[in-house]
Image (spheres, grey):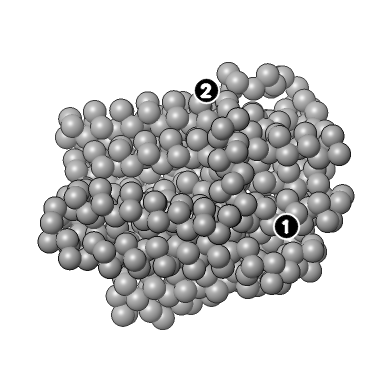
Amino acid sequence: MNEEHNLKERTSRGLAWSGMSSFTTQMLNLVIGIFLARLLSPADYGIVGMLAIFSALAGNVQDAGFTQSLINLHRPTARDYGSVFWFSSSISLLLYIMLFLTAPLIARFYHAPELTLLARILFLGFFVASLSIPSGAWLRKNLHNREMAIINVTALTLSGITGIIMALCGTRYWALVAQQLTYISATTIGRFICCPWRPSLTWDFSPVKGMMRFGVNIFLTNVVGTLSQNILTVIFGRFLTRTATGFFTRANMWNTMGHQLVTGTTSQLAQTVFVEVGDDPERELRVWRKMLRFTAFVSMPAMLGLALISHEVTAIIGPQWAPSAPLLRILAIGGAFMPIYTLYQNIIISHEQGRSYMLLNVAQVIILLLMALILAPHGTLAVVTGYTVLQISYLLPWQWVVGHYTGVRLHHVINDIMPYLLASIFVMMLTWAVTHGLESQPFWLLLLLRIPLAATLYTALMWVRHDDILTEILRYAKR
């Protein structure tokens, strides 16, 4: 009983710090994004967005699933962390050399010669990031969410200031490159300072070999997941203009900021908690369902609310971004369900079912690619709509696999999600109806009306139904 109480306390503290970190991070992202979007053009965002998939894939290779492998070990040793450090940094250096040499081919694929130098500088970031993989895993494994929150906020602040200063100096898309590199460098330094582990000069790859069986499926899955998240940018960048790609990139950035507010809160500790309770199926089911209710409690109103104010959000960064509004509205609906994917993925990983995890993601990216190619002739809006429908419907295969290995059943998921989904739809429709007549007013007035009104209505509705998640949040806040 004491052990369960201790885990509950650690989880509550972790959720509190993760929640504060995610909220602060996204608010900083919001402010920094507004400044940069007003100083830069859609084409500037488009050209940097074309390289996102290559940086992300290189990041998958450098990590190779070792972060999850270290977290999944019940008592990882300094030897385990050191083995991962030397292996990931060595692989990252080789990858950077390969990408440095192939940068002209990337530029030729997109018909953008300036991408050669841009890619060679931007790709330095994933090598620097590889140096912090073991220390980042240590902080997550030991639930040091407070330290991670401070690191993230500090790095984001420094990178935002750097990007804004460079944009004011007229450096165009180089401001975005500088912002990314500053964030990665600051995060790496911060993790190194906060983690007591230090790499030794001993090269011992035998622990890495032991992690390979589990890590390889995670690695392949992460690669496939990266393809899934970035495939639309590649298609738009190859077949459409830089400006059109920039509109999608900006809309997807707002959407990602929204759902990561929730995902960032749960993902930092979900796998660690599931590993600890995995020996007790009933306890694991209780923990998972409570995390699911917390996720739905936040993600449904947050993302459906973002869809409601999509026009006003894009108006903040200037009238030149207006074509992003309908894209953001559709993406945000799918984004409401993205944090739920994180819970499914973490519980599968905690059960060491890397192969199932990989196959689910492979199938999803194949379907997505076929869908995008079929809908591409019908325009950007059609592709984004198809992408959103696939995001929501593909939760069913995830549920089927998770249900096979755990006690989670479909009726559990429906019962836990549906109250928050229906409440959010009702609140957003009511908010729209009340404020619809004011749409000719300045966008900032609508934001000042719609956000507090929707938040008040949703909280009141949860209070009336005596929602257990709201009750626990208020209780913890008082403590």
Q: Element at badge 2?
A: helix
Q: Is residue 414 above or below residue 465?
A: below
Residue 319 sits in quarter: bottom left
Q: Nearer the viewer, mark 1 or mark 2?
A: 1
Q: On the picture, is 192 further left or further right than 117?
A: right
Residue 394 sits in quarter: bottom right
User: Label 1 crowding class (10 Å Cα cut-off): few <14, some 14-19, many 20+?
Assistant: many
Q: On the picture, is 313 further left or further right than 85?
A: left
Q: Element at badge 1?
A: helix
Total label count? 2
Residue 189 - label = 2
- Residue 170 x, y percent position in the rendering: 17, 35
- Residue 315 x, y percent position in the rendering: 20, 53
Residue 384 visible within the image: yes
Q: Is residue 162 above or below residue 35?
A: above
Q: Residue at x 72, y 28 (%)?
A: 82
Residue 89 visible within the image: no
Amino acid, disc 2? Ile
- Residue 191 x, y percent position in the rendering: 57, 25
Give the residue number, with chain letter if any, for mark 1. 348
Q: On the picture, is 60 further left or further right than 71?
A: left
Q: Residue at x 65, y 38 (%)?
A: 12
Q: Residue at x 55, y 35 (%)?
A: 477
How far apart marks 1 and 2 lie (CA) works out to 31 Å
Amino acid, disc 1? Ile
Task: Indicate the quadrant containing the C terminus: top left, top right, bottom left or bottom right.
Answer: top right
Comparing 84 with 304, the one in front is 304
- Residue 271 x, y percent position in the rendering: 70, 46
